[in-house]
Amino acid sequence: MIIKKAELLITAAKKEQYPATVVPEIAFAGKSNVGKSSMINALVNRKKLARTSAQPGKTQTINFYNINDQFNFVDLPGYGYAKVSKQEKDKWGAMIETYLKNRNQLKEVVLLVDIRHEPGLNDQQMYEWIKSYNFTGYVIATKADKLSRSQQIKCISAIKKCLDIKDKNLILPFSAMSKTGLEETWDLFENILGLKDIE
């Protein structure tokens, strides 16, 4: 994928603020600090398009990114951060649910998990939620540069078992640092978006 344009379209807290675009969208869900923003930056080869933070829970809105005027990447609020109040967590949950229910051009929701850790209860619930909306159930296992190839295989097996994923090909190892899995992830997204034969 040749990136000619990548820009933040809008940050939205409610449905009325969603951009009035009709291009297809891929949304990313995951725990706070799992590396959603870093992955978006790595994919489009920009250092600061999506703002990253060492402080978990920073993304508290739904962030829409326009890529090449062909499609949008959508960064959903991170979940599972203990220092956030229950009220705030409920608000984020409602925000994500509203988006999933109302965004007709949404093609896929991809779950990001840290490859080094077995998915937690929040991840399991989010994965079930994604599947309940009839999405495929792709998982990107981030921070793969922290592990050797053999450790990656072992950890992917653990993720597969924990989330009850039947097909291990639904799980892709990825590293924003080393660019591991970059090409494979783009191949997947181009297929989802129907862009495989359009360049």
Image (tube, rainbow, N blue to C red):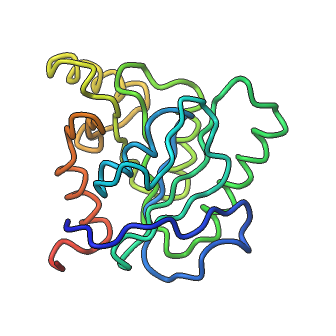
Pinpoint residue 79: horizontal percent, then vertical percent.
62, 37
| Quadrant where the image shows the C terminus | bottom left
Q: Residue 58 vs residue 159: left or right?
A: right
At a point 81% along the width and 31% down the height, the residue shown is 85
| Quadrant where the image shows the N terminus | bottom left
Pinpoint residue 112: horizontal percent, then vertical percent.
43, 39
**Which residue is at the front of the view, 192 or 166?**
192
Which residue reaches farthest front? Answer: 48
At a point 27% along the width and 38% down the height, the residue shown is 174
Q: Residue 178 vs residue 5: left or right?
A: left
Q: Is 34 drawn above or below residue 28 in the view shown?
A: above
At a point 67% along the width and 56% down the height, the residue shown is 97
Pinpoint residue 98: horizontal percent, then vertical percent.
69, 61
Q: Is 94 drawn above or below residue 160 in the view shown?
A: below
Pinpoint residue 163: horizontal percent, then vertical percent.
43, 32
Q: Residue 11 vs residue 195: left or right?
A: right
| Quarter of the rendering containing residue 150 | top left
At a point 46% along the width and 55% down the height, the residue shown is 109
